[in-house]
Amino acid sequence: MELLVYTLILTPFLSLVISFLFSNENEKPIFAISIAGVVINYLALIAILFLWIGNDFDPIFIKGPVLYQTDDIDFTISLFIDGYGLVYLFTSTFLTGIIIVFSKNYIHREKGYKRFFNNIKFFYLGLLVFLLSGNLETLFLGWEILGVTSFFLIGFYRERYLPVKNAMKVVSLYRVADISLLLGIWLCHHYFGYSINFNDLDGLHSPQPHIVNEVFYQFAIPGLFLIAAMVKSAQFPFSSWLPRAMEGPTTSSSIFYGSLSAHIGVFLLIRTAPFWEGNYWFHYIIAAIGLVTLVLSTLTGRVQSSVKTQIAYSSLAQIGVMFIEVSLGWYSLAIVHFVGNALLRSHQLLISPSILSYKIHHQFFHFIQPKKQGSSSFWQKIKLSIYILSIKEFNLDGFMYRSLWNPLKKIGNLFNFMTFKMTLGMIIPIYFAGLYIVYNKTVIPNVVLDYLPEFFALFSLIIILKAFVERKSARNAWVLIITNQLLQSLAFGFNDHFDYNQVHIYLSGIVISGILGLWVIHKLKSQNKNHSLNQFQGNVYEHPRLAFVFIVACLGLAGFPITPTFIGEDLMLGHIHENQFPLMIIITLNLILDGLVIFRIYSRLFLGRHQKSYHEYAYRSS
């Protein structure tokens, strides 16, 4: 059994590694390796299904390799299989195989043929890790892989303006979901005092002796998981990102936003149901969110002119119904509903280009003049108002920008008076003074020492806000991110009983990734490449290897799972005390912003229209 379960994860991973050995012109071997991996996994799933039935339908738990272990925290890659997971696994594997077969001709002779198939396999790997996860840490690993592959596939046509711009919009909201899930895991560590396994998860019913404020955890833990599910499944008010994600190839839109990835939030709610099942408020909240999304998505989808946008909103409406089903405790019905919706939306998206071509020809030869719409009666005015709001998608895109990112930009612009040299001149002495105090706490009175974590966290927030609005130099923004991470490590270091080896794990990832990123930026500058962040530079066109090295550095600096940065980050979050709410809020903003700045630097340096006039390029309107 264990060998079969490990085969599910190792097969797409090996398929991905082998694909790197071929060039973009070797389409047949790339396709053959991709489809062979899916077929092997499907056969393994059938064998697992029979073994699971023979085991009287009992869930299967497998404890895998230990990445890091202390007395309190256990980072283990654990796997878990139950009925819900198996249904999702069968559907995901079947649809991935269909998409790979369809893409063989659909992406034929594209410049990014190999890159597309590698992203699909990386997505499939992340989806398997997420669905097979036996604990929250493994679940977060798969969750992050799905987010990264979303960014790559939305921006697949990376020489165009809109795909890259919309990829950044999506990843900015995904970052909110990532940090919500990470904070939920952190609070679970606080509540239970150990890492959570899904096979023995019993919810938040029994009071824990070491918890001071029981009510806070009853709402905070399921609330954070709910926010993550809402963002990932594009539920209200985060619905606007889903149609923007359709900028990628139709095949990736089909597997990602029509069928599999958009339903991840439903699966997350089912998997974490023991956290909120006993709290009736959450049943009402989840149902209300699903109902509002259902109504708004139905109205919006009926008036859109783009067929992919219509399908996206139709799928959103059905996911809203699934949220209602989950809130009522009908988990099996929600899973069956997912299978039907996933198959239907994949089919609709794959045939949409052909249907659209047929409809356009039909309109040319069978044009019917629309009837004149009246607007005199009260009901006609109401209908017209709803129509206009639906056309504008209820202004949710502008609402998210005004409520989330615009205030942060305004705050960041307040520090424009600080030049880069002035900022470094302030940071260096403050950092070394803080470093001295961390190792010699007796030199500072306890009254002052209690406020130092918040002070250094707030100072690091100012630095990342300045990096958030930095436009003149990618190098300056990158250095500000590194210094922000160093100051954050000091903020954690002032708490009692802190293990400094955990800081060293965290800093090892920061230093290596930071130096690697600086080297790439220096290489671009030495070749007279513009490294301004005012516009997209498109350097991946001439420097694909540098782009690959830089995205690896970005993932390491942003705390991608299994990297030293992530392990150290999660370890240090566990040392924030439950009464340090200001510190928690500041660190949360830090984590969200540093991911956004990192991905923006990558997209501005390497994606978008390239600057050389002797190459062909796509105009902004294309």
Image: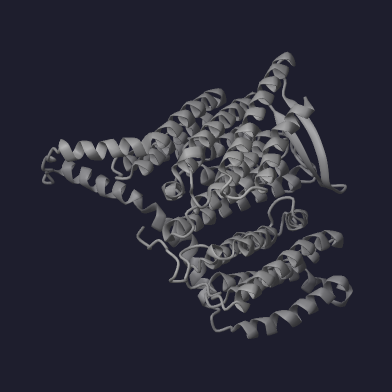
Q: Position of residue 614 (x, y in %)?
A: 44, 70
The coloring applied to the image is one colour
* Residue at the image position 54 percent from the left and 54 percent from the top: 171
* Residue at the image position 69 percent from the left and 70 percent from the top: 482
* Residue at the image position 66 percent from the left and 21 percent from the top: 46
Q: Position of residue 556 (x, y in %)?
A: 70, 59
Q: Position of residue 455 (x, y in %)?
A: 70, 72
Judge whether 233 appears above or below 531 on screen: above
Query: Residue 584 vs residue 338: left or right?
Result: right
Query: Residue 373 vs residue 244: left or right?
Result: left
Q: Nearer the viewer, residue 525 or 389?
A: 525
Q: Quadrant of residue 91?
A: top right
* Residue at the image position 64 percent from the left and 85 percent from the top: 421
Q: Nearer the viewer, residue 602 or 338?
A: 602
Q: Quadrant of the N terminus?
A: top right
Q: Nearer the viewer, residue 247 or 197?
A: 247
**Number of marks in picture:** 0
Q: Quadrant of the C terminus?
A: bottom left
Q: Does residue 2 appear in this view?
A: yes
Judge whether 560 appears above or below 460 on screen: above
Q: Nearer the viewer, residue 2 or 383?
A: 2
Q: Position of residue 370 (x, y in %)?
A: 14, 40
Q: Does residue 499 appear in this view?
A: no
Judge whether 162 appears above or below 390 on screen: below
